[in-house]
Amino acid sequence: MAKGLIKISGAREHNLKNLSLEIPRDQLVVITGPSGSGKSSLAFDTLFAEGQRKYVETLSSYARQF
């Protein structure tokens, strides 16, 4: 994975069907598109879940059980 990018490959969540993209880190990113195109699914479900997964990976195995 490139250091300055968040890479998403084959995202499938609600309205998203095999979406692949690279989002730059440490920059303001705006997600636009027509109604029902999966903007909220991308921002709230996919990106949040990936961030949470990476955070949990940093915890010790003892802390993960809580």
Image (cartoon, rainbow, N blue to C red):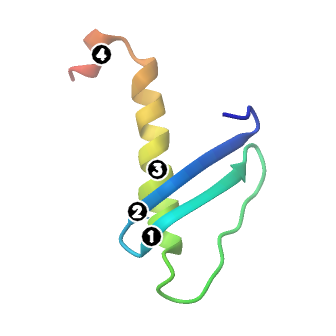
**Mark nearer the N terminus (2 vs 1):** 2
The image quadrant where one finds the C terminus is top left
Whole-angstrom CA distance, mark 4 to mark 3, is: 20 Å
Which residue is the site of mark 2?
A: 12
The answer to whether 53 appears left or right of 19 in the picture is: left
> Residue 5: which quarter of the image?
top right
Which residue is the site of mark 4?
A: 63
Which residue is the site of mark 3?
A: 48
At label 1, counting other C-alpha atoms closer than 10 Å, the crowd grade (few under 14, some 14-19, many 20 or more) is few
Tell me the tag on residue 49: none
Tell me the tag on residue 17: 1
Q: Nearer the viewer, mark 2 or mark 3?
A: 2
Circles 4 and 3, Cβ within 8 Å, touching? The answer is no
**Mark nearer the N terminus (1 vs 3):** 1
Give, as a three-letter code, the residue at label 2.
Answer: Arg
Give, as a three-letter code, the residue at label 4.
Answer: Ala
Circles 2 and 1, Cβ within 8 Å, touching? The answer is yes
Q: Nearer the viewer, mark 4 or mark 3?
A: 3
| Numbered disc 4: secondary structure | helix
Give, as a three-letter code, the residue at label 3.
Answer: Phe
Q: Residue at x 35, y 71 (%)?
A: 14
Circles 2 and 4, Cβ within 8 Å, touching? The answer is no
The image quadrant where one finds the N terminus is top right
Q: Nearer the viewer, mark 1 or mark 3?
A: 1
| Numbered disc 1: secondary structure | strand
At label 2, counting other C-alpha atoms closer than 10 Å, the crowd grade (few under 14, some 14-19, many 20 or more) is some
| Numbered disc 3: secondary structure | helix
Whole-angstrom CA distance, mark 2 to mark 4, is: 30 Å
